[in-house]
Amino acid sequence: MTEDAYRIPSVGATVHDTARDRVGRVMGHIGPYVRLRPLVGGVEWDADPNHLRPLAPSEVLSALVAEANARSRQQR
């Protein structure tokens, strides 16, 4: 892995948790883990910072649209 793969993202950053294949916003840090929450809210989870990668703005928009579409399908 590159040196950047071991950087701990700052609070508020949007990242992809490759271990769980989920996108989340960094809410804080607890011990060796990063605390993430889904972009549209929900239950937080702990993630290993070595399995996180920052998202480009276009990826954040795509993730938000995907979550909105999933909510829309559930409401029908």
Image (tube, rainbow, N blue to C red):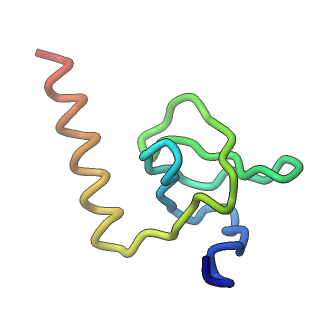
Give the quarter of the image for residue 66. Answer: top left
Residue at image coords 51%, 30%? 42
Q: Which residue is drawn at 17% across and 29% down?
A: 72
54 and 61: which is toward the camera: 54
Residue 65 image point, x, y percent? 22, 50
Pick whichever, 2 or 69, lies toward us. 2
Tell me: 75 left or right of 18: left
Q: Residue reaching furthest right?
A: 31
Estimate the x, y position of residue 17 in percent, counting from the top left.
Answer: 52, 52
Q: Is residue 68 left or right of residue 34?
A: left
What residue is drawn where x is 77% and y is 50%? 33
Question: Outermost residue toward the front?
Answer: 1
Residue situated furthest bottom in the rendering: 3
Task: Specify the quadrant of the image occupied by residue 52.
Answer: bottom right
Count of marks overlaid on the render? 0
Residue in the picture at 61% in, 35% down: 44
Between 43 and 6, the residue placed more toward the observer is 6
Quadrant placement of the C terminus: top left
Which residue is at the front of the view, 45 or 67? 45
The N terminus - image quarter = bottom right
14 on left or right of 57: right
